[in-house]
Structures are given as C-alpha cells and as structure tokens.
Amino acid sequence: MPRHYFDILLFGPWMRRLFLVAAAAAAATLSGCASFSQDGGFAVVEQTARDRLGKDVQWARSPADQDTIERRVSELLAKPLPVDEAVQVALLNNRGLQASFQELGITEAELVQAHRLPNPGFSFARLRRGDEVERERGIHMNLARLIVMPMIGVLEARRFEQVKGQVVSSMLTLAADTRKAHIQAVAAEESVRYMRQVQQAAQASSELARRMEQVGNFTRLQRAREQSFHADAMLGLARAEQTQRVTRERLTRLLGVWGAQVHYSLPGRLPDLPADLADQPDIERVALGQRLDVQDARLLAEQTALNLGLTKRTRFINVLELGGVRNESNEAPTQRGWEIGVELPLFDWGDARVARAEALYMRAVHRAAQAAVNARSEVREAYSAWRSAYDIARHHQDEIVPLRKLIAEENVLRYNAMLIGVFELLADARVQIASVNAAIEAKRDFWLAQADLDMAMLGKPSLTRIAVPVAPASSGAAAPH
C-alpha cells in the first residue's frame, strides 16, 4: 500500500507537539533579530562622519530626502567653496556614495531573511485504481535548516557588520579624494595666475627686444633669446591652464555636480602653512587601533574561524528532514506515524569541506598579519612625506621667496639709479615669479601629504573584504526527498 504524507494538523498530539516545539525553539531563538532596524545600519556611518570628519551624511531613501540634499548643496555652492565645504558637498551629493549606502539595505534584507523560519513543503494528490481511491497529503519541514539557522544568523550578522565597514571606508576615501582634488584645483588656479604674470613679463621683454633690434641696439641673437623665453612662457601657461581644467573636472566629478552647478567658485589661494608640526612618536600604535583595513582583516579571520566550526559540526549531515506520515485508503485502516530522512556519508565524509575551511581560515590569518605590517609601513611613509613636505614648503616660504623679493627690490633701486638695464630687471622679475610659483607647488604638496597621512591613519579600502562562504551543509539541506 502506498505511503501518504498528511498535513501536520491531522497528526496525533505527539507529532503536533514535536513540530510545534521545534518551530517555537527556533522562533524564540531568532525572533529578536528577524526584523528590520530603524536606521538600516546607517547610524555607524553618520557617527563616523561626525567623529572623524566633522561632517554630515544623509541617505537619500526618498524623493524628499533628495530634495533636502539638493537644497543644502545649492546653499554650499552659492559662495566660494573652501576645502571643508567641498568635502561636505561630496558626502551629500556623490551618487556613487549613495549607491554604497544601498548596500546596507541589501545586506540587512539578507540578514532578516536568514533569520526567517523556512516554509514547510505541502503536497496533495488523489489517485484512483479501479474502485480503490487514494489521497496523498503531506507536509515537510527542513530540520537541518532549523538546526543551523542560529549559526547562519551569526554569519549574516557579521557580514552585515563587514558591509558597514566597507561603506564607512568608501565614505572616508571619498572625503580624502575630494580634499586632495580641491587642493590640486586651487593650486592649479594659483599657478595659472602666476604663469600669466610670467607670460606678460616675457611678452614685454620680447617686444622691447624687437624694438631694440630695429634701432640697431640689439643683435639677432639677443632678440632670439628673449623671444625664446616668451615662447617657453606661452607653453608653460598653456600647460598650467590644461592642468587647471583637469583638476577642476576631477573635483567636479567627486562633488557630483552638473549643469549650472559646475560653475562653482574656489578660494583664491591655498590655506597658510601651520606654524609648527607636533611630533607623533606613537603614530603606528594609534593607526593600528583605528585603521579600517586592519579591523576588516581581523573580522574576516573571526568570521572564517566561526565558519570552520560550523563546517566541522555539520560535516556528516547534508540532508536531515523530519516529516509526518498518514496512510489512508478506502480498503484499509488509516496508518499514522513519522519519518526522518538522513543522507548516509558513505562516499563523502566531509573531510574535504573541513580542509577547505581550515585553509580559508589560515589565509585570513595571514592576510590579517600582512594588513598590520602594511599599515605600519604606510603610516611611517606618509608621516615621513608629511614632515618633509612641510620642511620644503616652509623653506620656500621663509627663505627662498623673501630672498627673491629682496633681490627684486634691490634691482629696482639699481635700475632707478641707471646701474642696470631693463632686461636685467625683467629677467630678475621672471625669476621672482618662478620662485613664488614653486612655493605654491610646495604648499600644495604639503596639504596633499596631510590628506595622505589622514587617510593612512584610517586605512584604505581593504582587498581582504571578501564574502566568507557558508558551509555547504547549511545550504545543501534545502532539497526535499
């Protein structure tokens, strides 16, 4: 006589209690985590932006949120955009960052789904053989899924935390890139202004040389030298203007602006150098405590270790199902009972899965150690570059530029006393302008080094952020017999 799987409600009291106890235990264990949070995991992003950047971020989840962001951005762009306001605009308006915020919603949905009880399977059939009528009704509960649900929930919760770290890292990277792009754009505009002064001085010198040659006071060689300097100055100005356009467009992309907003204005000059730099002897220790890539590598090692324990505990269980049985026929009494289906480990003893999990764990451990080594080296390198850039910029500001200015003033006095000619005076003016341009570049390099040091203290996006695979036993149990 064929078997019939009956609905759980038709089973006897013992079987009903068994199913209800199993379902209630799983529900009680997971009910506290099976709902969406109010902030969607965005609170840690907001807190990091306030604590480490002193800025606001907003997740555009609705058209009203987007309108609020656009109004705030328009207010910031209505006046010259300092570096801090530029970072604020990027954090609010960059669509790539907004897309990364959506990863929080995607991962939280997967976390909630991992805590939901699996739906039971139901089947119904009506068969006829002559005068004999058979009805089959059955319900199946994936018992293996229930067993591993708490462990899968822990894995998904850790992955959710990992995604939060990725989003935070993306936000910090955007802030650092915007800061550097703003510095480069402002420095490029300053360089263009000074290169125009060089070009104007060269043009005046070239025109004067042409006239001097016409009256016979200059040779062709002397005029050619002045014209050559003018040609070089024109080329330098063209290159400076191209650099200005490139750096501005790079900043525009990071700000996420378009249309009329691309005509935003920038400050006329870079910020002044700090009066002095404080020594930071424990900078490596501080960096290791707050670098995101080091924290991610540690989290990955912990998550892999947890997955290794899950694999070892479920190495022999790939499919485990519990079902109720009720056999009914119009020619025989009804039979009631239950059955358990287990996959026999005759050929696959799970040792390959365990070996794979152990290898994944050791890989994560080595990557965590390498992340710490890299962090120390990167912080030392950034700190050294920062100090050197400051010393160079300070030397330009305190020594070279004042000396060039003094020389220019003395040459003006000599020119007024008719001790030197106009060409000597113009040549000295060109040198002075070039020294000022070099000082601008040195100041730019210092602020870029400052941004690099800030990012080195926080860590770059980690290459070790990979999804740790869940043990095969936790997913392979879904197939019913």
Image (cartoon, helix red, strand yellow):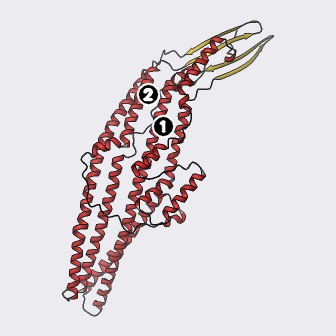
Inspect this view and state whether residue 267 appears: yes
Q: Is 473 displayed left or right of 408 in the figure?
A: right
Q: Residue at x 43, y 56 (%)?
A: 87
Q: Residue at x 56, y 37 (%)?
A: 36
Of badges 1 and 2, nearer the viewer stands: 1
Q: Is 80 displayed left or right of 12 in the figure?
A: left
- Neighbour tally class for label 1: few under 14, some 14-19, many 20 plus, Cα within 10 Å: many
Q: Quadrant of residue 266?
A: bottom left
Residue at mark 1 to residue at mark 2: CA–CA distance: 15 Å
Q: Quadrant of residue 178?
A: bottom left
Disc 1 marks which amino acid?
A: Phe
Q: Residue at x 71, y 16 (%)?
A: 136
Q: Mark 1 points at which residue?
A: 160
Which callout, 1 or 2, points at the residue further toward the start of the chain?
Answer: 1
Instruction: Give the SS element for disc 2.
Output: helix
Q: Name the residue under label 2.
A: 307
- Counting from the top left corner in percent of width and height, residue 55 is at 44, 53
- Counting from the top left corner in percent of width and height, residue 359 is at 38, 29
Instruction: Give the SS element for disc 1.
Output: helix
